[in-house]
Amino acid sequence: MYFAVPDKYRQASDDELIQWIKEAKKSYGDRMLILAHHYQRLQVAELGDFVGDSYELSKNASERKDADYIVFCGVHFMAESAEILSGDNQKVFLPNPLAGCPMADMADIEDVMNAWNYLKEIGIAAQTLPLSYMNSAAELKAFCGREGGLICTSSNAKAAYKYVFDRAEKLFFFPDENLGYNTGRWMGFSDDEMVLWDFRSEDGGIDPDKLKKAKVILWKGHCHVHTNFKSQHVDEMREKFPGVKIAVHPECTWEVVDRADAVGSTKFLVNYIDEQPPGAIIAVGTEINLINRMAHRHPDKNIFELSGQICPVCANMYRTTLADLANTVENIDSFKKITIPKDIQAEAKLALDRMLEVH
């Protein structure tokens, strides 16, 4: 895909871009809603009408029926979700169309359907419900809706697991193996009850008997940002900073989350940091833009990223610039909107609606 921002915006100063964005927002009033994920650049996030994690933003998009234009400063799957939940009068835009998600791409719908057909062959699909993390393409969300499953975020993964096991014997979770495994452990499942489906291996690389006995089938996928954090980073920070609080996202590996003081969604991490007293030392295992923004918000606290040596940046979240946002809001009527085939949208909405009902 080729995408270029006009010279007017590329060559403008930050002050000019911010002024143009604010003027466009003012001219459209409530008809334009700018949503920004916590991982966005500081200047972009500050211009959002609402800043949140994927669950909060999806819920906000579903409730703002008065907004004709929804500008989603995030990545593609988030804008897709907003489009799925939007009304007929609404249009959804992604300021930088190149902002994707490598983890979402790890669960290709063709690979998923091959796996599901294999579960049918060995006779366990009928006892299984699919559960997809929000970080997935619309086609995968539609598959979950079609098969009676739902979507979850890191905010409500435990509740989504309960939803599945109230209705089925087995759960098939995609695409993040770490969130899936960690949630399984928190819900009381043992390692013997969870298996990892490797889409690159024949029949998932799992012995059929072991697959039949499993309660939780995890998809082999991960977030390249959160898997950078290692258990030794936790140990090093505790040695270097006595009294440090370790707060991490559940997309980190079990070895990290099991050693942390606090584990939760992006919203949870924001609230946790907000609630710590002045002088607190907090090492955070998540995306660097959120960490930097929290450090900016709380100069009276020592907030830094957990490893102390890497820069855990989500390059796709970082793609969205002030120039992208200004280009979008000033040319909203000619900017390409997010589109999803009606059949995919209808089935995906079933899964997302179930997600919004689960707490």
Image (cartoon, rainbow, N blue to C red):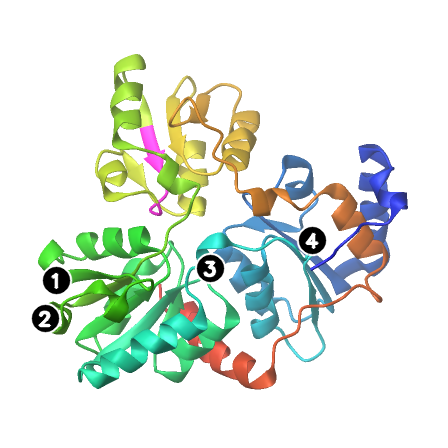
- For the residues labelled 2 and 4, the Cα–Cα distance comes to 44 Å
Say whether marks 2 and 1 touch (CB < 8 Å).
yes
User: Could you tell which of marks 2 and 1 lies nearer the N-terminus?
Assistant: 1
- For the residues labelled 2 and 1, the Cα–Cα distance comes to 7 Å
Tell me, yes or no, if residue 218 can be seen here: yes
Is disc 4 surrounded by few (<14), some (14 to 19) or many (20+) residues within 10 Å? Answer: many
Q: Is residue 250 magenta?
A: yes
Pick the front one: 254 or 117: 117
Residue placed farthest to the right in the image? Answer: 8
Relative height, residue 339 to residue 329 (above, below): below
User: Would you name the residue on which mark 4 appears?
Assistant: 96
User: Could you tell which of marks 2 and 3 lies nearer the N-terminus?
Assistant: 3
Say whether marks 1 and 3 touch (CB < 8 Å).
no
**Residue type at the position of mark 1:** Glu
User: Would you name the residue on which mark 3 appears?
Assistant: 104
User: Could you tell which of marks 1 and 3 lies nearer the N-terminus?
Assistant: 3
Q: Position of residue 86 (x, y in %)?
A: 62, 73
Q: Position of residue 273 (x, y in %)?
A: 42, 32
User: Would you name the residue on which mark 1 appears?
Assistant: 193
Q: Residue 164's image quarter?
A: bottom left
What span is colored magenta in the figure?
246-251
Say whether marks 3 and 4 touch (CB < 8 Å).
no
Q: Circle 4 — which element?
A: loop
- Residue at x 60%, y 52% (from the top left corner): 74
Q: Is residue 270 magenta?
A: no
Q: Circle 3 — which element?
A: helix
- For the residues labelled 1 and 3, the Cα–Cα distance comes to 25 Å
**Residue type at the position of mark 4:** Asn
Left or right: where 10 falls relative to 64: right
Pick the front one: 32 or 211: 211
User: Could you tell which of marks 1 and 4 lies nearer the N-terminus?
Assistant: 4
